[in-house]
Amino acid sequence: GEDVEQSLFLSVREGDSSVINCTYTDSSSTYLYWYKQEPGAGLQLLTYIFSNMDMKQDQRLTVLLNKKDKHLSLRIADTQTGDSAIYFCAEIEGSASKIIFGSGTRLSIRP
Amino acid sequence: DGGITQSPKYLFRKEGQNVTLSCEQNLNHDAMYWYRQDPGQGLRLIYYSQIVNDFQKGDIAEGYSVSREKKESFPLTVTSAQKNPTAFYLCASSRQDTEIEQFFGPGTRLTVL
């Protein structure tokens, strides 16, 4: 079945860029998402990208999509302590309405 | 304020008891979803509903039941048949089942003692 994979942890220094990577398997996905989850809270949609796009930029966030390799990345420029959270990559399943989530990457910021 | 509410935030139950988790939305969304989150894992879909009085099983529906009698409400019952019920439960909704964004509630942490 469909699968979304991402590494579990990432540690970066405050002010540096963070790059969170994700691979997915469903080539028919129309949308790919990045969600953010702060401790003990629900998920918040950060950004999404249509499958016919290669890049999307939104302030400090840059999403890159490589459809050939089924690879999605999220770059956070000038990472701040408030960016500490779990980041979930997700894809919408083919023709259905289901969203498939990765396991989440816990981003920690060191001074 | 529009949004999704889940109550309670924390819930404790004894093993063998059924428990119902509440999820209410005032966003006028048609579709609603229940997910389970375990440490180090992504969200797994339990049940979803695209319209009132209709719902479908997700990937891990065994031991759970839902109802959708009203558009605003989608309660989840964790039954005693669920072998490992302790988890963080998240409810979400979207305008229709193909809408881009799912809006999430704050979650309910269920601990079964």
Image: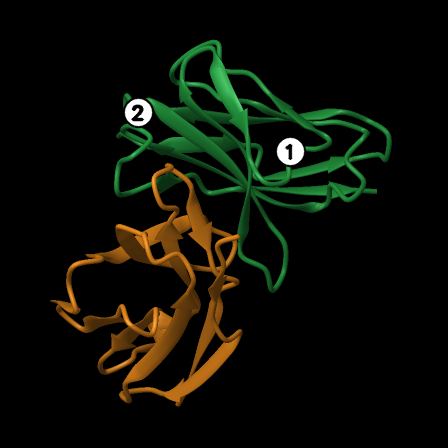
Chain colours: A orange, B green
What amino acid is labelled 2 in the image?
A: His
Front in this rendered view, residue A40 or A103: A103
Q: Chain letter of disc 2? A: B
Question: Which residue: 84% across, 34% down?
Answer: B14
x, y percent for residue B50: 39, 23
Question: Where does the C terminus of chain A fall, quadrant-wise?
Answer: bottom left
- Residue A66 is situated, as x and y percent measured from the top left of the image, at 26, 73
Who's the residue at 27% across and 68% down the image? Answer: A67
Residue neighbourhood size for the residue with mark 1, other residues' Cα within 10 Å, grouped as few (<14), some (14–19), many (≥20):
some
Location of mark 2 (residue): B29
Name the residue: 34% across, 51% down: A44
The secondary element bearing badge 2 is classed as loop
The x, y position of residue B15, in whole percent, is: 86, 35
Label number found at residue A83: none
Choose mark 2 or mark 1, whichever is in front.
1
Total numbered labels placed on residues in the image: 2
Tag shown at residue B61: 1
User: Picture quarter containing residue A32?
Assistant: bottom left
Q: Residue at x 22, y 80 (%)?
A: A77
* x, y percent for residue B19: 71, 26
Alpha-carbon span between mark 2 and mark 1: 22 Å
Quarter-wise, where is residue B111 in the image? top right
